Image (cartoon, rainbow, N blue to C red):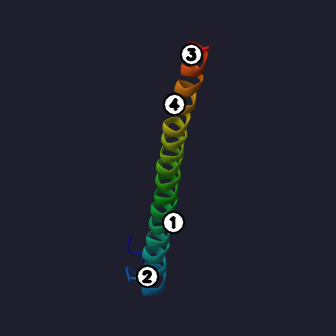
Amino acid sequence: MLWSDDNGIVDINKTVGNIAQHQRANLRNGYVNYVLIVHILFLIYKLSTIEINYKPNLNMGIFKTLRN
């Protein structure tokens, strides 16, 4: 992580820039993962609600045909 020149003197600007770059990359990856998880959870939620709302309609149709 530490950048130094040929004399062994640590270059603070390069070192700090490098660390900041890595932290920005980590934040970006964390944000992308967060967004993906939220989207997947939302899709599962939508699918489950659609399924729950859809089942009574199927049952009603079956009962109507049985009555007739």
Q: Nearer the viewer, mark 1 or mark 4?
A: 4
Q: Amino acid at mark 3?
A: Arg
Mark 1 vs mark 4, CA separation in Å: 41 Å
Judge whether 52 appears above or below 28 on screen. Answer: above
Residue sitting nearer the eye, 18 or 58: 58
Check disc 4: other Cα within 10 Å, few if <14, some if 14-19, many if 20+.
few
Which is more N-terminal, label 4 or label 1? 1
* Rendered location of residue 47, percent (x, y): 53, 40
Task: Say which residue appears at 38% left-offset and 84% top-offset.
Answer: 9
Task: Say which residue appears at 51% left-offset and 53% top-offset.
Answer: 36
Which is more N-terminal, label 3 or label 1? 1
Quickly name the residue at label 3: 67
Q: Secondary structure at mark 2?
A: helix
Mark 4 vs mark 3, CA separation in Å: 18 Å
Q: Amino acid at mark 1?
A: Arg
Q: Secondary structure at mark 3?
A: helix
